[in-house]
Amino acid sequence: MRAERLSIGEARRIAVAASGLARRSPGRKDRRHLAAVVDRLGLLQLDSVNVVGRAHDLVVYSRLGPHPATLLRDAAYRRRWLYEAWCHEASLVPTSLWPLLAWRRGRMHADRWWRGWVDGKGPLLAALEAEVADRGPLRASQLSLPRVPRSSWWGWDDAKRGLEHLFAVGRLAVADRTGTTGFERAYDLVERVLPADVLAAPVPAEDDARAALLLVAARAQGVATLADLADHHRQQPALVKPIVARLVEAGALVPVAVEGWDQPAYVHPQASRPRRVAARALVGPFDPIVWHRPRAERLFAFRYRIEIYTPAAKRTYGYYVLPFVLGDRLVARVDAKADRTRGVLLVPGAFAEPFADPLAVAEPLAEELGSLAAWHGLDRVEVGGRGDLAAPLTLATAAGLR
């Protein structure tokens, strides 16, 4: 079969449309809108960093705009149609996908995180599960077992690590996020968290489950290479390569050759192929449109690295940088921080991409920053002096206040 050829512009438009970034609509947002976002993306990556907002909240905001702050929390920890899983790192996943991830839970004992550590930990794991069964849901800080801080594994001791292991293999589930930060996991028995019909659902064969996850990825990405598809649920490209070939043979994926790409690519048969997309959104570092950095470079010529762990003097753009999507391009990036004490969204630096006109980008970016600030309950946006976009963005922000 000869692969269809796509220009890089066509590929970008397919990708942006598939990501849901071009579908924002006015009006009040409710559970139906959130469900559409999660159904389209297949998962939301979790992250504890709260410089501007939590990673999962930013993904939803980028697609819905202002919405009730409790919407996602309600879906995950009250109504239970989302649950936490190791998927694309730690993620919120539709509860209906629980059977498709059984193969991963079954392999967690041999995962590099647990290999060796779990040996001899049977009594500890049994004691942890028994205490959660008796007293749960429980945070690690609420355990009656003695706690001995460790320097590795984010300071986890064996008790916390044991809870995480029981969660990873599917014996426990995350019932809530609470504690002083509002983001500490509270663990409970999985049968007290997930719906009974989900737990009783048939578990497909591993290859069939992997194939279903690849199709979830293809729908979310629109156009993708084998490595892109595999990355969505952290599958290994070499393992899923024959599965992708079978999906192509069955017509479930359409092979394409994208201008400038040196790897074959695939399009979901139902992917929209718009001639134009009117996306306008700030996206976080863990947004699906940019989370696989090689794909972001191939699609948008956008080299993106998170610099949280880079010493301040060596950062190129800033601590927590949000790319800005306009149309079918990533046209700019802003270093952003919510100063909640002062009620200000700080933008120490703003940078246009080499092809973009800072004057044309400044006004829509100022509007998006103002909307994001208001959603967080912040009173204004304060732009610093770093970057070629800083001066026009300062003017555009001031004009928007008048």
Image (spheres, rainbow, N blue to C red):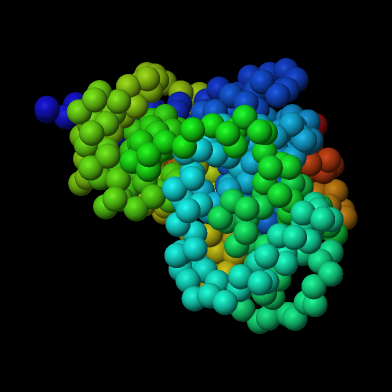
Q: Which residue is drawn at 76% across and 47% down?
A: 176
Residue 358 horizontal/vertical position (percent):
52, 42
* Residue 226 spot, x, y in % from top left: 29, 44
* Viewer-proximal residue among 394 and 250: 250
Taking the spot 56% from the left edge, 55% from the top edge, the residue there is: 169
Taking the spot 33% from the left edge, 41% from the top edge, the residue there is 207
Quarter of the image where one finds residue 150: bottom right
**Viewer-closest of 347 and 390:** 347
Q: Where is residue 265 in the image (x, y as percent from the top left)?
A: 26, 37
In the figure, 334 relative to 196: above or below? below
Q: In the displayed image of the protein, which residue is found farthest to the left?
A: 1
Asked whether the viewer can see residue 204, the reply is: yes
**Rendering quarter of residue 275:** top left
Quadrant of the frame with the N terminus: top left
Count the marks.
Answer: 0
Check the image and report above or below for 18 versus 133.
above
Residue 301 visible from this viewpoint: no
Which quadrant would the C terminus be assigned to in this image? top right
Q: Is residue 360 depicted above or below 226 in this figure?
A: above
Residue at horizontal 53%, vertical 75%?
A: 119
In the shown orientation, is residue 111 left or right of residue 54? left
Q: Relative to residue 233, is residue 93 drawn left or right? A: right
